[in-house]
């Protein structure tokens, strides 16, 4: 499950989605991994109608390294 699966997005929508995820990932990295951003990530996925299971690991935890 290393990558997010992006379905049904135009290039413009994908760019907006990617920017939001990138900013969130940067926020997480700046906190040195101490910040729990799962709720924010799930909200971004829901906003863009993406399946949240694509960014969860085997234990159901957010895969913070999933690439967009």
Image (cartoon, helix red, strand yellow):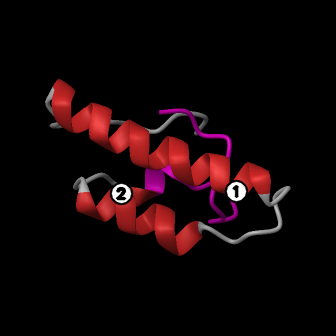
Quadrant position of residue 52: bottom left
Membership of 67 in magenta stretch: yes
| Spot occupied by residue 23 in the image (x, y as percentages of width and height) | 53, 48
Q: Which mark is residue 46?
A: none
Residue 25, above or below 47: above
Residue 46, above or below 66: below
What is the spatial separation of the Cα atoms under label 1 and label 2, in whole angstroms? 16 Å
Q: Is residue 32 left or right of residue 56?
A: right
The residue drawn where x is 30% and y is 32% is 15
* Image: magenta residue range: 53-68
Residue to which mark 2 is pinned: 45
The residue drawn where x is 25% and y is 61% is 47
The answer to whether residue 63 is seen in the rendering is no
| Spot occupied by residue 33 in the image (x, y as percentages of width and height) | 81, 58
| Spot occupied by residue 57 in the image (x, y as percentages of width and height) | 65, 53
Residue to which mark 1 is pinned: 28
């Amino acid at each position: 499950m290393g990558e997010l699966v992006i379905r049904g997005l135009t290039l413009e929508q994908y760019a907006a989605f990617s920017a939001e995820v990138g900013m969130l990932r940067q926020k997480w990295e700046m906190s040195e991994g101490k910040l729990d951003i799962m709720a924010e990530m799930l909200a971004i996925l829901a906003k863009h109608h993406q399946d949240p299971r694509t960014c969860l690991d085997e234990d159901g935890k957010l895969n913070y390294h999933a690439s967009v």
